[in-house]
């Protein structure tokens, strides 16, 4: 196996290495210790702006067991809290979701094992583009980005078809179980959100083709970074899809944008971290907010995050739900989910505008 490129400690000018030469930031970080990071990883302008830590404790918490309660008033209160969380933050933690700690731990352990496989063993999964069912790589979008990100990833399409690597042994089996349970949680949340918008509980599922919807299972690894103040694990972005449900190890790093400030997310034990994604903003005609988020780094511990994007059916035309348009003007164009995803890939490095801005109609509510 060829050793990863190394960086000289004595160099005053850090090298400008391309992510595709590095191949795996984990392997690079393992072999380069405390050496200065390559200047191609500097995203200093974005890295340390205003962090509003006093807001961290205000991140909404949704108790899933109340949402699924048979008691009408308890359910109604939970629906109303959920609607408020989607409107005010576009982000919330989900507790008592019913996925066992044991399963979550197994998925996390296997995720770690996957990233610990030798680089050579992961080559067969090399990223061949956004629609490839199994793809492993480093950074964010190395082919096109100007700045690189301190992250290795594995991304799988796990619905409507389930695709998963055959190693390490046992990963595929626990991941299947986990992905199906996450889909069930996402479906129930979507039903609650539908009700919070004054719609039938199945309205959002039906209009997005959720039954045969896309699910992307990602496994991110952020190794310790010797200069965490200079780099980012993930740039600010919103997700395509309806709802992303993320589980992480005990190491913090996720930040969400709220009222123009970055807020550190300190997850409650065993909770799922949920964020509204672009297609939910569009189908809700702007009532649910797709939230900007990013991953920051530390110089001590490896962070692993496992976000599962739960989206519409790829060929479905997605726009504001027709029931909402009986009373209001559409604020978003209707566009096939597949085409939106493509659009998002194309303009992901445009700092001023996201894909959502491309489909927003210039109207006041
Ligand atoms: O690692 C995290 O906390 C964020 C991950 C993320 O935003 C993504 O994979 O799109």
Image: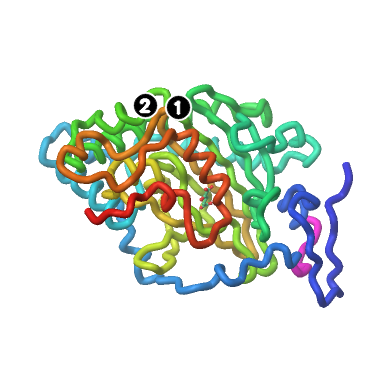
Residue 315 badge: 1
Q: Residue at x 74, y 57 (%)?
A: 29
- For the residue pair 242 and 271, the one nearer the viewer reads as 242
Is residue 238 positioned above or below 253 on the image? above
Asked if residue 33 is among those painted magenta in the image, a careful observer would answer: yes
Q: Quadrant of residue 211?
A: top left
Disc 1 element: loop
Q: Position of residue 17 (x, y in %)?
A: 79, 59
Quadrant assignment for the N terminus: top right
Residue marked by disc 2: 209
| Lower position in the chain sequence, tag 1 or tag 2 | 2
288 relative to 301 in the view: left or right: left
Q: Residues within 10 Å of mark 2 (few under 14, many from 20)?
A: some
Q: Is residue 5 above or below residue 47?
A: above
Element under label 2?
Answer: loop
Q: Is residue 174 left or right of residue 50?
A: right
The spot of residue 12 in percent (x, y) is: 82, 77
Marking on residue 12: none
- Which residue shows up at 58% across the image and 33% down it? 156
Instruction: Indicate the quadrant where residue 279 lies.
Output: top left
220 is higher (above) or lower (below) than 114: below
Q: Is residue 92 visible?
A: no
The front one of 75 and 18 is 18
Residue 73: x and y, percent? 10, 40
Q: Position of residue 91 (x, y in %)?
A: 36, 52
Q: How many marks?
A: 2
* Of labels 1 and 2, the one closer to you: 1
Instruction: Kindly identify the residue that appears in the image at 74 percent across and 53 percent down.
Output: 19
Marks 1/2 in contact by CB < 8 Å: the verdict is yes
- The region drawn magenta spans 30-36
């Amino acid at each position: 196996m060829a050793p990863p490129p190394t960086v000289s400690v004595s160099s005053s000018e850090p090298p400008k290495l391309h992510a595709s030469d590095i191949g795996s930031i984990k392997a690079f970080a393992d072999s380069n210790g405390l050496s200065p990071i390559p200047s191609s990883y500097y995203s200093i302008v974005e890295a340390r702006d205003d962090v509003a830590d006093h807001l961290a404790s205000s991140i909404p918490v949704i108790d899933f067991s109340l949402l699924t309660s048979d008691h009408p008033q308890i359910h109604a209160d939970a629906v109303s809290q959920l609607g408020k969380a989607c409107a005010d933050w576009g982000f919330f933690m989900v507790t008592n979701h019913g996925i066992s700690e044991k399963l979550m731990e197994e998925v996390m352990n296997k995720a770690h094992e996957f990233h610990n496989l030798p680089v050579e063993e992961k080559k067969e999964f090399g990223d061949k583009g956004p629609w490839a069912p199994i793809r492993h790589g480093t950074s964010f979008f190395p082919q096109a980005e100007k700045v690189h990100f301190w992250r290795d990833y594995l991304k799988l399409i796990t619905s409507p078809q389930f695709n998963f690597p055959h190693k390490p042994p046992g990963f595929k089996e626990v991941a299947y179980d986990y992905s199906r349970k996450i889909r069930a949680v996402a479906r129930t949340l979507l039903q609650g959100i539908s009700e919070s918008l004054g719609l039938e509980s199945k309205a959002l599922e039906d209009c997005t083709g959720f039954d045969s919807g896309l699910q992307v299972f990602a496994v991110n690894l952020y190794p310790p970074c010797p200069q965490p103040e200079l780099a980012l694990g993930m740039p600010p972005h919103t997700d395509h899809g309806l709802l992303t449900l993320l589980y992480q190890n005990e190491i913090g790093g996720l930040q969400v944008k709220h009222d123009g400030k970055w807020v550190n997310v300190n997850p409650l034990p065993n909770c799922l971290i949920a964020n509204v994604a672009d297609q939910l903003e569009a189908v809700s005609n702007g009532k649910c907010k797709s939230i900007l988020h990013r991953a920051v780094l530390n110089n001590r511990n490896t962070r692993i995050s496992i976000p599962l994007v739960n989206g519409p059916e790829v060929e479905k035309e997605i726009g504001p739900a027709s029931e909402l348009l009986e009373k209001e003007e559409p604020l978003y164009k209707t566009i096939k989910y597949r085409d939106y995803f493509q659009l998002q890939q194309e303009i992901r490095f445009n700092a001023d505008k996201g894909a959502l801005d491309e489909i927003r109609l210039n109207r006041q509510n």
